[in-house]
Amino acid sequence: MIQLGVLASSRGSNLQAIIEAIERGEVDARVAIVISNRPEAYALARAASHRIPARVVQEEDYPSRLEHNRRIALLLEEHKVDLVVLAGYDRVLHPEFVRAFPMRIINIHPSLLPAFGGGLHAQEDALRHGVKVTGCTVHFVNEDVDGGPIILQKAVPVLDDDTEESLSLRILQEEHRILPKAIQLFARGSLRVVGRRVMSADR
């Protein structure tokens, strides 16, 4: 069983999906700690309701992003975290942080990367560009924003009457499915990174 450190900035619905998948026995992991950069994040309440340790580490309390990230890394190390999961975390990690957890950080992004990466408005961008299919991506995090090797993707059709809200909701439903699945692939040790490709016999 692997130990997870989950970083979340807002609602924490992907955190909830992870917790529920663990409780159903679908993911061989334990959420060791939840860390948020926002004290009002509902993810903290979700953690508390499941008796998961949670900490707030606000960026403004530190002189630099590097020092902020070093504090987060220390907490993760103290809780012996094997995999860092970015579940709606709205800050770019410092390169030093990424290097401290090589191929041990995954992120969920609401688009079919590399399309509409690097921003916080992927669903709006998809609608504005008139694409017919979008979706979500779980990827390893490297020093390129939204540029790490892709683990899993799920396509979501864009309907003619979609709004940003309706499209976001359908994408989120798929996020809740593929993020726990990606964690389980990691937990089983079945992921192998070859160049930019992530191989798995269990996919």
Image (cartoon, helix red, strand yellow):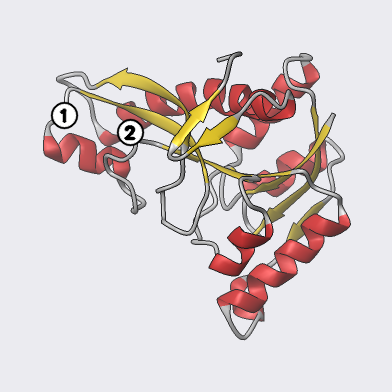
Residue 138 versus residue 86 in the image, above or below:
above
Residue 194 shown left or right of residue 16 in the figure: left
The quadrant in which residue 101 appears is bottom right
Q: Residues within 10 Å of mark 1 (few under 14, many from 20)?
A: few
Q: Is residue 109 visible to the viewer in this orientation of the structure? A: yes
* Closest to the observer, 68 or 97: 97
Residue 100 versus residue 174 in the image, above or below:
below
Please state which of the two labelled residues, at mark 2 or mark 1, is closer to the viewer: 1
Quadrant of the frame with the N terminus: top right
Q: Is residue 37 visible to the viewer in this orientation of the structure? A: no
Three-letter amino acid code at the position of disc 1: Val
What residue did someone put label 1 on?
Answer: 131
What residue did someone put label 2 on?
Answer: 165
Residue 112 versus residue 89 in the image, above or below:
above
Quadrant of the frame with the C terminus: top right
Spatial separation of the CA atoms under disc 2 and disc 1: 16 Å
Q: Earlier in the sequence, mark 2 or mark 1?
A: 1
Three-letter amino acid code at the position of disc 2: Glu
Q: Residues within 10 Å of mark 2 (few under 14, many from 20)?
A: few
Q: Residue furthest front?
A: 194
Residue 58 % position (x, y): 64, 70
- What secondary structure is marked by label 2? helix
- What secondary structure is marked by label 1? loop
Count of numbered tags:
2
Residue 104 shown left or right of residue 79 in the figure: left
Q: Residue at x 71, y 48 (%)?
A: 44
Q: Residue at x 65, y 36 (%)?
A: 15
The quadrant in which residue 17 appears is top right
Residue 50 shown left or right of residue 113 in the figure: right
Residue 10 % position (x, y): 56, 49
